[in-house]
Amino acid sequence: MANAVLMPKAGITVESCIIGKWEKKIGDHVAVGDVLFSYETDKASFECESTAEGELLEIYFQDGDEVPCLVNVCAIGEKGEDCSALRPEGGASAPAAAEAPAEAAAPAAPMAAVPTGQASEGGAPLSPRARKLAERSGVDAALAVPTGPNGRVIERDVRRLMEEGAPTAAPAAAAAVSAPGPESEYEDVPFAGIRKVIARSMMNSLHSMAQLTENFSFDAGCLQTYRKLMKQSEELSGVTLGDMILYAVSRVLVRHPDLNAHLLEDGVTLRRFRHVNLGVAVDTPRGLMVPTIFHADEKSLLEISRQVKDLAAQARSGKISPDLLTGGTFTVTNLGSAGVTSFTPIINPPQTAILGVCGITQQVRPAPDGSPAFYPAMGLSLTVDHRAVDGAPAARFMQELCAELERFTTLLAR
């Protein structure tokens, strides 16, 4: 009897995954444990291993398709075995190898009835196979009724449109879409995988919140002095200025519960947390990731320093567990090393605030004798969801945080 291979559930919070690349093709013999395809969540990338042995009979989703977790992705069994009962709703209705001749038999027509991006003109996302078929057939994919996962237009939807005799795109529109530009002047790079998820998340954050940003600065002299002392210790030499800020945030935030909170989907319920689960933005080759230091308010400076480095390394490797990328109650993003002096961080929903850490600049202020004196000023940018936090409480949090950072050794002693 043929067996289905399911899209793995990579973490308890993951609901769907995007297929990266198939490593096997229909007709290949596979053994248990063979890598069938790579896949990624919005957090990390993985490999799906076969859970059955036999011939790869059918593939139901293609490279780039977003597939719900625990849905049949392919069928494995004996050669020629019927596996139609394993086909999921929204998956391909025939083996991928058998689809190529049907595509070749499609009637010739003007090219590019739809844009070559990943969405139809009607707004529904297009699978790569559906897009190619629409381009070849001249069918306007915006008229297709999507039946794929997450409202996606897949190949069978375009074929149904062709069978119903749907009109092709207007010649002028098709010509405008297909007219090539000078190849050397630009390159179109469609978003894929985690980049698409980041783009969607950022737009959702800005569209669903009333975001307000406040900019502060403080004298970082105490932090720099303490950092020099720690460099003399082998055990503490890895602690950075950024680690000190994370430590200070974890201590101050518990006294400002509206900022250590989630605004629930109803838009009128604030969930305050008793502990600080500190999200730390990490730049990775695949895009921005935000691993979480759970109960940061109970950890020492050294524990925070070590954990944030370990989490960052896991995130950059692409092998971090998705469960370590959720559950944050407040986020810190640091662009100081890039020379940024002020910016507008975007809140990570459903959190109510995010802190941006900026670089150090030399500023002037009066010395005790009235003469001008330089000091190292570090910038901080706090963005809050104005629905949950007003400007004055946000400013009080920042004033307290800056004061604690200016007397950091006193904060450590508590």
Image: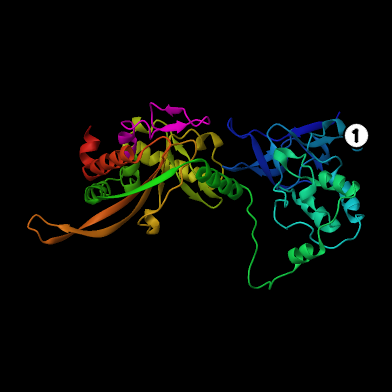
Q: Which amino acid, mark 1?
A: Glu
Q: In which quarter of the image is the N terminus?
A: top right
Q: In which quarter of the image is residue 52?
A: top right
Q: What residue would you read off at disc 1?
A: 81
Q: Which of 234 and 144 is in front in this view?
A: 144
Q: What stretch is highlighted in magenta?
A: 249-276
Q: Quadrant of the C terminus?
A: top left
Q: Position of residue 101 (x, y in %)?
A: 91, 52
Q: Which of 295 and 139 is in front in this view?
A: 139
Q: Where is residue 104 in the image (x, y as percent from the top left)?
A: 90, 56
- Name the residue rendered at 52%, 29% in the picture: 266
- Name the residue rendered at 31%, 34% in the picture: 251
Would residue 254 be counted in the magenta stretch?
Answer: yes
Characterize the magenta stretch by its predominant secondary structure.
loop
Crowding near pointer 1: few (<14 within 10 Å), some, many (20+)?
few
Camera sees residue 26 = no
Q: Where is residue 11 in the image (x, y as percent from the top left)?
A: 59, 33
Q: Where is residue 80 in the image (x, y as percent from the top left)?
A: 92, 37
